[in-house]
């Protein structure tokens, strides 16, 4: 299997209102937050692409949005001040793991351009603020149909 691009969609369900959320591109001091959205009474959604390369028969996820070592890759959602919001007390990041995406799933996506991988995660944490750290519970990534454009 050659390198392949995957379209991912992260849906933050019912995050607290008035907080900025954004997708982190890059890492360390050289990152930027894109697709910044202020939450209201709706879910917040991010859609983007990553690359997958086979590494000893296992998927290795690559690209500007991918963080972490090869066996523990994840996506960061920046929250509050990390997303550039000035008028907030929130400074958090939400870590969305990429584990559990199988070769069979990747092959299925390669045969249908109308399909994407979607993860739905709680937008609000136990403290009533934005969910942060590694998302729990995490129901994983599921194949979904791309919305009509």
Image (cartoon, helix red, strand yellow):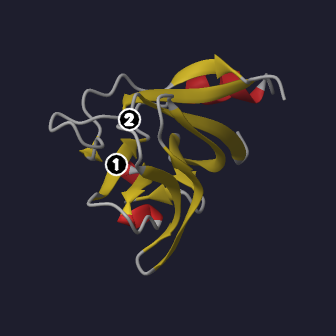
Mark 2 — residue?
15
Q: Position of residue 108 (x, y in %)?
A: 68, 21
Q: Quadrant of the C terminus?
A: top right
Give the labeled residue for mark 1. Answer: 94
| Residue at the extreme right of the image, as rendered | 149
The label nearer to you, 1 versus 2, is: 2
Indicate the quadrant containing the N terminus: top left, top right, bottom left or bottom right: top right
User: What is the CA distance from the residue labelled 1 to the residue labelled 2?
Assistant: 12 Å
Residue 108 sits above or below residue 36 on the image: above
The residue that appears at 67% across and 47% down in the rendered structure is 49
Pinpoint residue 13: horizontal percent, then vertical percent: 42, 27
Rendered residue at 65%/46% (across/down): 48
* Element on which disc 1 rests: strand
Q: Residue furthest bottom?
A: 29
Q: Which is nearer the eye, 80 or 34?
A: 80
> Of residues 61 and 119, which is closer to you in this image?
119
Question: Element type at marker 2?
Answer: loop
Residue located 59% across and 29% down the image? 117
Q: Is residue 29 above or below residue 89?
A: below
Q: Which mark is residue 14?
A: none
Q: Residue at x 21, y 36 (%)?
A: 128
Question: In terms of image quadrants, where is residue 27?
Answer: bottom left
The answer to which image quadrant residue 14 occupies is top left
């Amino acid at each position: 299997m050659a390198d392949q691009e995957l379209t991912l969609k992260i849906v933050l369900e019912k995050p607290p209102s008035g907080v900025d959320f954004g997708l982190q591109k890059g890492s360390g001091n050289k990152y930027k937050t894109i697709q910044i959205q202020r939450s209201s009474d709706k879910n917040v959604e991010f859609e983007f692409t990553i690359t997958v390369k086979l590494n000893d028969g296992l998927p290795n996820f690559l690209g500007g949005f991918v963080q972490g070592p090869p066996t523990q890759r994840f996506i960061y959602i920046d929250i509050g001040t990390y997303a550039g919001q000035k008028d907030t007390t929130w400074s958090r990041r939400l870590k969305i793991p990429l584990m559990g995406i199988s070769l069979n799933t990747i092959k299925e996506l390669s045969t249908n351009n109308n399909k994407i991988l979607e993860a739905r995660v709680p937008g609000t944490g136990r403290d009533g603020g934005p969910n942060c750290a590694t998302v729990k519970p995490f129901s994983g990534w599921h194949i979904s149909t791309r919305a009509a454009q």
